[in-house]
Image: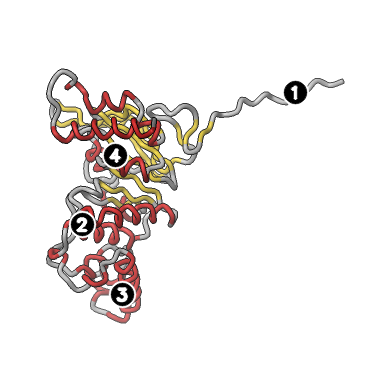
Amino acid sequence: MSSDTTPTVTPVKTTGLHIGDAVPGVRKVDPIIIADGVRRTFGGLTAVDVEHVEIPRGAITALIGPNGAGKTTFFNLLTGFDKPDAGVWEFDGKPLQRVPAYRVARMGLIRTFQLTKSLGLLTVLDNMKLGAKGQTGENLFRSVLPFLWRKQEDEITVKADELLARFKLDAKREDYAASLSGGQRKLLEMARALMSDPTLVMLDEPMAGVNPALTQSLLDHILGLKDQGMTVLFVEHDMHMVRHIADWVIVMAEGKVVAEGDPHTVMANPAVIDAYLGSHHDSDLGETDTEHVEVLKELIDDEQ
């Protein structure tokens, strides 16, 4: 009788979005972003020092951490708005280091800003049109020949109107963007991002400065992005929001990734509380970080 020579295969431990234990830098089943050794310093301050991190495709990932943790700087590096001292990263299998921001956007990675970047002296509709990519009329020669770009312009207008209606900004279509409230500008920036049909949407504190009346609307739209097949990565301080809409949470402190996991597990992780307390265990915390710690404790109590 011949012996069985079939090799023994040890199954890889896979849980939902990740492979193996949920530790900092854990591998993901289908990562859309992979970053290695990304480091950014400002003088003697190390703002970002990420050894390895992966962002899962098709999920909503929250990037949280205390003030000064390096979250927005990391966003800027990934999207080409800043240059690192070291490191490599890729988006959808394509390297992004040394790729300028406008090319990153054309590749399907779109980000919004904590302070909205709408052009106040343009109408809401014109702001939306700016988000469409591959516009024939942007070419100097073709711009003087309307028959080359008129049809595309009409299609862009139709798409913009559909998005404005979805975000309940259609009544503001002809208003100047400067006349919008802070929350409406957040909605406009998110709607404009969708004009380019992105694969990954990165939102930097989407709830900052938003009237509570618009909070639920923004939450619904973020969940809607996932339903449409997009990946979402967002920076946020509202822990209740993080727990209710995030599929995965990455915690940064002092530029490093210190914890990862699903929202319920991360909220109960003592390392996360430590990240917010930092070196201030025996001193007064800032008002914002104190609020974050109290919210975390409340969420832990809720889970129990």
Q: CA distance from mark 4 to mark 3?
A: 41 Å
Q: Earlier in the sequence, mark 1 or mark 4?
A: 1
Residue at the disc numbered 4: 239
Q: Earlier in the sequence, mark 2 or mark 4?
A: 2
What residue type is disc 3 on?
A: Glu
Badges 1 and 4: C-beta atoms under 8 Å apart?
A: no
> What percent of the width, then of the height, locates residue 33?
39, 41
> What percent of the width, then of the height, locates residue 47?
20, 31
| Residue at 34 percent of width and 74 percent of height | 158
Q: CA distance from mark 3 to mark 2?
A: 28 Å
Of the pair 153 and 241, the residue shown nearer to us: 241
Badges 2 and 1: C-beta atoms under 8 Å apart?
A: no
Q: In the rendered structure, find residue 83 and report the number of the disc placed on it.
A: none
Q: Residues within 10 Å of mark 1 (few under 14, many from 20)?
A: few
Residue at the disc numbered 3: 153
What residue type is disc 1 on?
A: Thr
Residue at the disc numbered 1: 5
Q: In the rendered structure, find residue 183 and report the number of the disc placed on it.
A: 2
Which quadrant of the figure contains the N terminus? top right
What residue type is disc 4 on?
A: Met
Q: CA distance from mark 1 to mark 3?
A: 65 Å
Q: Is residue 172 left or right of residue 262?
A: left
Q: Earlier in the sequence, mark 2 or mark 1?
A: 1
